[in-house]
Image: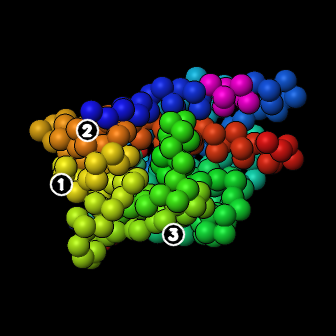
């Protein structure tokens, strides 16, 4: 039976620290502001945006929501980003993805000022993560690292296997584990012998997007298993890991829901506070 890594508890600890940091800035006359842009009516995106707004309000961060219609043009969206780039009271800008098909996500992300890119999707921030000299880390992998730290699980010298190589999760996850001196393998849909590779993992991170993808026979006895997946099975939210079977083998495991999910928003709040500090030349 493994230890449950509780994302609700750990994210609450992160958010409490952020709230303290925001209050500290307020004393110095500095407010912290996040602008969230959403284009169209995607129901999942609307829920994510509402949750981000709620988190901001709870921590004293000013949040501005820009809900644009589905038929918004690239020029209109770029004009809004430009306005927010120049708005003094806005420290962080995020554009909820996915965007409607007619909008080029790359063009929009590239238009956000790197110092306000609290999602860390801008190529300048991606490059900084590669070098290991960064202020912002994509929120989900950052959340996973925070969970490991909180639980006293040090990746140094450990065999770390990440399943998934997306720009948002898998690749930065691999880089962050590498920066902490893990020995990292990133797997994907063309990986051969996936099961054998997973069986070597001391730390196994699943970011695939398929329910029950990681089965108990892919997990080494005593491994730490982090489940990033968010899927629906019989209408219920679940991860990528066959939780009931894998928890019997793992030494520690994250549940879904209540695992990595709550960490993502907490790390967004932390990135927004960091942005405000940097823009006001405050270290820490
Ligand atoms: P993605 O862009 O679809 O990437 C999925 C990755 O899984 C790809 O690299 C893909 O390989 C790999 N893959 C697919 N089938 C595979 C197979 N049979 N064997 C090995 N690898 C396989 O998804 P994502 O954005 O990274 O998200 C992954 C999951 O995390 C999703 O469930 C998403 O909802 C969830 N997520 C959760 C949070 C959170 O806050 N908890 C945040 C972000 C994402 P190829 O590159 O070869 O196609």
Pointer 2: what residue?
A: 247
Identify the magenta region: 16-22
Instruction: Choose the circle earlier in sequence order: 1 or 3.
Output: 3
Q: Which residue is mark 3?
A: 106
Prevailing secondary structure of the magenta residues: helix
Question: How far is disc 1 from disc 2 in space, using C-alphas?
Answer: 12 Å
Q: Are marks 3 and 2 in contact (CB under 8 Å)?
A: no
How is this picture coloured?
rainbow
Q: Residues within 10 Å of mark 1 (few under 14, many from 20)?
A: some
The residue where tag 1 is placed is 217
Q: CA distance from mark 3 to mark 2?
A: 39 Å
Q: Is residue 256 left or right of residue 122?
A: left
Q: Whole-percent x and y of residue 1? A: 27, 33
Q: Position of residue 14 (x, y in %)?
A: 59, 32
Mark 1: C-beta under 8 Å from nearest atom of ligand 1: no
Quadrant in which the C terminus appears: top right
Instruction: State which tag comes first along the sequence, 1 or 2.
Output: 1
Q: Nearer the viewer, residue 117 or 209?
A: 209
Residue 88 located within the stretch drawn in magenta: no
Residue 52 versus residue 88 in the image, above or below = above
In the displayed structure, would residue 182 be above or below residue 45?
below
Q: Residue at x 88, y 28 (%)?
A: 28
Q: Which is nearer the N-term, disc 3 or disc 2?
A: 3
Report x, y in % for residue 84: 68, 50
């Amino acid at each position: 039976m493994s230890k449950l890594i509780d994302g609700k508890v750990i994210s609450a600890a992160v958010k409490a620290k952020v709230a303290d940091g925001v209050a500290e800035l307020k004393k110095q006359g500095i407010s912290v502001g996040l602008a969230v842009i959403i284009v169209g009516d995607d129901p999942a995106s609307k829920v994510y945006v509402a949750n981000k707004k709620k988190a901001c309000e709870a921590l004293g961060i000013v949040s501005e929501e820009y809900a644009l219609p589905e038929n918004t043009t690239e020029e209109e969206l770029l004009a809004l980003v430009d306005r927010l780039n120049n708005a003094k009271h806005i420290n962080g800008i995020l554009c909820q993805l996915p965007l409607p098909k007619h909008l080029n996500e790359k063009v929009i992300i590239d238009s956000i000022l790197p110092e306000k890119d609290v999602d860390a999707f801008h190529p300048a921030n991606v490059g900084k993560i590669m070098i290991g000299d960064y202020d912002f880390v994509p929120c989900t992998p950052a959340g996973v690292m925070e969970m490991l730290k909180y639980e006293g699980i040090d990746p140094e010298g450990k065999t770390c296997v990440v399943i998934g190589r997306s720009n948002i999760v898998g690749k930065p996850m691999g880089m962050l584990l590498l920066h902490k001196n893990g020995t990292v393998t990133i797997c994907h849909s063309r990986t051969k012998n996936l099961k054998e590779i997973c069986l070597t993992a001391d730390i196994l991170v699943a970011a695939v997007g398929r329910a029950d993808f990681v089965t108990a026979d892919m997990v080494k006895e005593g491994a730490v298993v982090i489940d990033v997946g968010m899927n629906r099975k019989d209408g219920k939210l679940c991860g990528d890991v066959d939780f009931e079977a894998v928890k019997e083998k793992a030494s520690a495991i994250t549940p879904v829901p209540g695992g990595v999910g709550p960490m993502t928003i907490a790390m967004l709040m932390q990135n927004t506070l960091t942005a405000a500090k940097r823009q006001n030349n405050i270290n820490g």
